[in-house]
Image: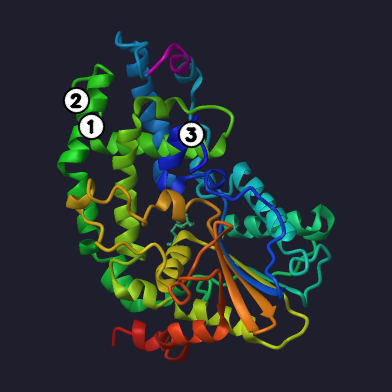
Amino acid sequence: CTNDGYPFECYLSTMTPYRTVSNKDFYKIQFDGCKAKKAWMVVRHGTRNPKAATIVGMKERLPLIKQKILDSSSFPNEYVKNRDLDLFRKWKPSVHPKDEKKLAHEGEEEMLLLAERMQSRFPAVFDNVYTNTTYRFKYTYSQRTQKSAYYFARGLFGKATAKSVYYPEPTKQDPILRFYKLCEKWNKNIKKNPETLLEKRLFENGIEMKQIVNNINQRLGFKSYLTTDDITLIYHTCAFETAWNKKSKSPWCSIFTVDDLKVLEYVEDLKMYWQDGYGYELSYKQACPAFGDMINFLESNDPHSKVTVYFTHSGTLLKMLAHLGLYKDEQPLTADSFSKMSNRQWKTSKIDSFATNLAFLLFGCEDGDKILTLHQERVVRLPSCPNSDLCSLNQMNKYYENSIQSCDFDALCNTR
Ligand SMILES: O=C(O)[C@@H](COP(=O)(O)O)OP(=O)(O)O
């Protein structure tokens, strides 16, 4: 995380703005004896608005809490300072439920800058002249991914051309971009099964959460006015407002210490781990159609098509990361392992921020074709090639043989 001066930005889980994890370098990435030929990318949409229920909480509950804070005689103190009180006085909810999940202005910028940096790193692949044979873009059936695609294209080709880029009609159920919506078994046994979130619930009702709820109430001089749900709502508001505004601080963040945020971040990490990550094998095994699409695209001999970019959601990115074997901790994430897991790899603030992206670059090298993998624009080494940045197609095919050769989505996902 790149903001030491404002550490709140680094613990916002899946609501983390991309600027805290992106790689701002945009030097050309080159390897001796190799030429970049193609790219396949999957991108989570940029910073968005919250879901309607959170917006309603912001509109109905937060004004009451705000008034209670302003009426309290405990402030200013070490946490809520005079400038925070000023911000509270001016604060009012800024989004309407009808705008739920829409792409925010920050999200537009995230896409634009991401595209610009990818183009400067790989100018021979990300051409600044658009043709619908070179580029293949696709987004899911949602405003946030559609707009994300547009701003990404704008970053590559400029405003005028971006308007005429071709996109296929999005489908409500897309077998590659959002494969899990079609996976009956995952929906039934994992997504809709209350047991999936057992560890999350245990942690939410556990000692660490109780302690932060007590501490925050005490810090605010409230006895026990704020409930766990209130704290979660305030955390989400702090996160979204931080993501939306890089220049101004959300007053809601001021009630937290960094240690409180680490606990709240863990709640979200537990949810994503058990729902979309390593918690259950099916969650990540079912990503083989998307993985296969990447291999097919990079292996295909079509001399024209160079770039595929898919604009999609957190659920796809996390399942893909786990499918590859990245960010796998030795121990599973559980309610009672919070303190043991402080250095865990599965940290959604880092691996699943807004605009999270995974890119596979094909390099033609003197000794064969190789793949470079970038996550959040940084080189990552896949388990297929732990000792080198470039991984030969042969090694990839060997290591991920099961996924590539035996991807039977229907057999994996059928409940009958
Ligand atoms: O749509 C959302 O609320 C979540 C979950 O979507 P699914 O995993 O259900 O697709 O993803 P986000 O769009 O924030 O990346």
* Mark 3 beta carbon near ligand 1 (under 8 Å): no
Give, as a single range, the part of the protein colored magenta: 80-85
Quadrant containing the C terminus is bottom left
Residue visible at 65% across and 55% down? 147
Mark 2: give few (<14), some (14-19) or many (20+) Cα within 10 Å.
few
Mark seen at residue 35: none
What residue is shown with label 1?
213
Mark 1: give few (<14), some (14-19) or many (20+) Cα within 10 Å.
many
Q: Amino acid at mark 2?
A: Ser
Task: Give me the C-alpha separation between circle 2 and circle 1.
Answer: 8 Å
Question: Picture quarter containing residue 119?
Answer: bottom right
Residue visible at 59% across and 57% down? 377
Of callouts 2 and 3, the N-terminal one: 3
In this view of the protein, which residue sits in the foreground, 4 or 250? 4
Query: Ligand 1 lies in which image quarter?
Result: bottom left
Mark seen at residue 224: 2
Apparent side of residue 413 relative to residue 171 in the rendered image (left or right): left
**Magenta stretch secondary structure, dominant:** helix
The kind of secondary structure element at disc 3 is: loop
Q: Amino acid at mark 3?
A: Asp
The kind of secondary structure element at disc 1 is: helix
Residue 46 position in % (x across, y down)? 57, 51
| Image: 399 above or below 35 | below
In this view of the protein, which residue sits in the foreground, 205 or 134? 134
Closest to the camera, between mark 2 and mark 1, is 1
Apparent side of residue 254 relative to residue 198 in the rendered image (left or right): right
Question: Picture quarter containing residue 155?
Answer: bottom right
Task: Give me the C-alpha separation between circle 2 and circle 3.
Answer: 32 Å
Residue 218 position in % (x across, y down)? 22, 21
Apparent side of residue 92 relative to residue 63 in the rendered image (left or right): right
Mark seen at residue 4: 3
Closest to the camera, between mark 1 and mark 3, is 3
